[in-house]
Image (cartoon, grey):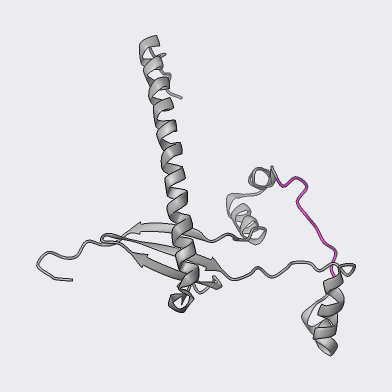
Amino acid sequence: MKTQTPLSKNHLTKLVERGFVLQNQLLVLQAEFAGIKDQLKAEALTRAGEHIPLSDKKSEGDQWIATGKDCECRIVFPAPKIKTDLDPLEPDFKTIKALTGDHFRSLFHRVVSYEPQDKKTFRDDVSRFLAESAATQLLDLCTSPSEPKAVWKALPKPAKGKSA
């Protein structure tokens, strides 16, 4: 490992002060950014007729795309998550059973349920215990997306000499 010469007190002070200024600027920008995302999500909800299916065949749900001059924003609406377990003691269970009728056993089966030992350290524990490929696959199987999110990306610049 490369050894580093300690920073001078003056340089260290400047780094700390600049970091503090940047942190405060980021807080302001994050608040503005959150407001923009909220406004775009709200707009997307009012434009349900403009939603299109997600382009990733593995993902269920739809999206609304708003474009700017050199960018776009996709408001992604994941499909509602399928509940992974149903509690027979919950009031909805009787309704579920009644709705499925003779097909209940074709649609559901009784299982023993497992949950992570510690949800806060689960990712680290998986990475510690398993090889990288197995850890990645396990985490894919044990996680699920939820809240809509805004995703920005740069659009390709038009070729010179071509009009849009």
Q: Residue at x 85, y 89 (%)?
A: 102
Q: Position of residue 151 (x, y in %)?
A: 43, 58
- Check the image and name the residue furthest to the bottom: 102
Q: Position of residue 129 (x, y in %)?
A: 68, 45
Q: Is residue 1 left or right of residue 71?
A: right
Confirm whether the magenta stretch covers residue 107.
no
Q: Residue at x 87, y 77 (%)?
A: 94
Q: Residue at x 85, y 80 (%)?
A: 97
User: Over which residues does the magenta segment extend?
Assistant: 110-119
Q: Is residue 56 left or right of residue 8?
A: right
Q: Is 5 situated above or below 151?
A: above
Q: Is residue 136 left or right of residue 121?
A: left
Q: Position of residue 122 (x, y in %)?
A: 69, 47
Quarter of the figure that contains the C terminus? bottom left
The residue nearer to you, when weighing 71 against 84, is 71
The residue nearer to you, when weighing 55 against 69, is 69
- Check the image and name the residue furthest to the top: 9
Q: Position of residue 98 (x, y in %)?
A: 85, 84
Q: Is 4 situated above or below 157?
A: above
Q: Is residue 162 left or right of residue 99?
A: left
- Check the image and name the residue furthest to the right: 89
What secondary structure characterizes most of the magenta part?
A: loop
Q: Is 151 situated above or below 163?
A: above
Q: Residue at x 61, y 59 (%)?
A: 140
How many discs appear? 0
